[in-house]
Amino acid sequence: FGGAGGPGFHFGGGAPGGSGMHMSSEEADLLFSHIFGNGDPFGGSFGGSRRRSGNPHMSFNMGGGGPRGSGMGMDPLSMMFGGGMPGGSMGGGGMGGSMGGFPGGSMGGMPGSFSNGSFRQPAKRYNAIPAGTVVSLKGLVSKPERNGDRGEVVDYDPASGRYTVLLEDEGEHLRVKPTNILQHVHVTLHGIEARPELNGRRGTVMAWNGSKERYNIYVMDMSKVVSLKPANVVLENETVGHIIGLQSKPELNGNWGTIKSFDRQAGRYEVQVSRDQILRLKLENVVV
């Protein structure tokens, strides 16, 4: 169950802690089309109260990396978060956006500080997932029952290398490693030779299947879930991705960086990892 107020669905997969009934891709398509129509699963902004009195909830656990606990509606992301997380952050246009804001403010901004009466924004971090990004938990060993729980990134502590995530249903804060987070970001499908009609379509990351190394992508205008390799998925600009699988410069593997652009002709992202360093990386070398 996704929370108080109604029944839920729970379909599990292959990640640690995943449980529940396995659904085929055809069954998943049918379920998503009935619930979401042509809506964007994670297309809403945030704001207002988390409470959703009287609304039914859904629960998803897709391969340990999918969201759990969502209400019904045409736009699944805004639906899933009931208009916002506690504290009313504003995701300014979709995924991981912020509106500036002061410490403790309600606009989802990164905290700043005051010095000698003036306000100073912290230095831009290119290797940290922004506050307000919609995520779900995966691969937790100490708390496997939390795998699949959905929430928002609150902040990142570079000293410990952990994020604070505010869980949507429980209102609980958890500190987790970056590898225990799946970001539900927007994508564009690309380079699919077997099904070229999918190329150029927009979708949203719903889950990650670690054993097959594929995303489950909900394609909005088709009301369909497809399973795709990272090489066929273009992550949205400003997404903070995890760098993996580099052969020529293996020392860069494990770093994180912000996608600034995608060169379609070359098939490479420009990924900024620091103020002075931008890397050109293939699609399959940057994941969320």
Image (cartoon, grey):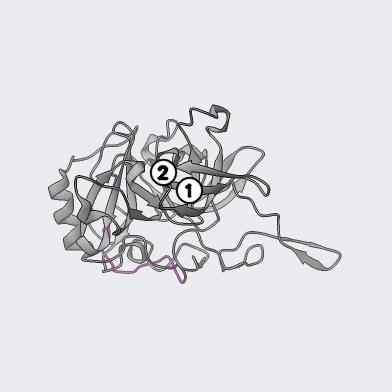
Q: Is residue 244 visible?
A: yes
- Residue 56 in magenta stretch: yes
Where residue 85 appears, as percent x and y from the top left, is 46, 62
Which circle marks residue 269 in the picture?
1
Foreground pick, 9 / 264: 264
- Could you tell me if the residues under marks 2 and 1 are in contact, i.e. CB atoms within 8 Å? yes
Where residue 93 appears, as percent x and y from the top left, is 46, 68
Where residue 115 appears, as percent x and y from the top left, is 83, 62
**Is 250 displayed left or right of 68 in the figure?**
right
Which circle marks residue 71 in the picture?
none
Looking at marks 2 and 1 on the same chain, the residue that comes earlier in the sequence is marked by 1
Q: What whole-number distance in Å separates the C-alpha atoms at marks 2 and 1? A: 7 Å
Q: Which residues are magenta?
A: 45-61
Disc 2: which residue? 283
Instruction: Tell me the residue at 30%/48% (across/down).
Output: 191
Instruction: Tell me the residue at 55%/45% (across/down).
Output: 257
> Which residue ends up furthest to the front in the rendered image?
265
- Residue 240 in magenta stretch: no
**Is 60 displayed left or right of 238 in the figure?**
left
**Is 109 displayed left or right of 9 in the figure?**
right
Where residue 77 appears, as percent x and y from the top left, is 35, 62
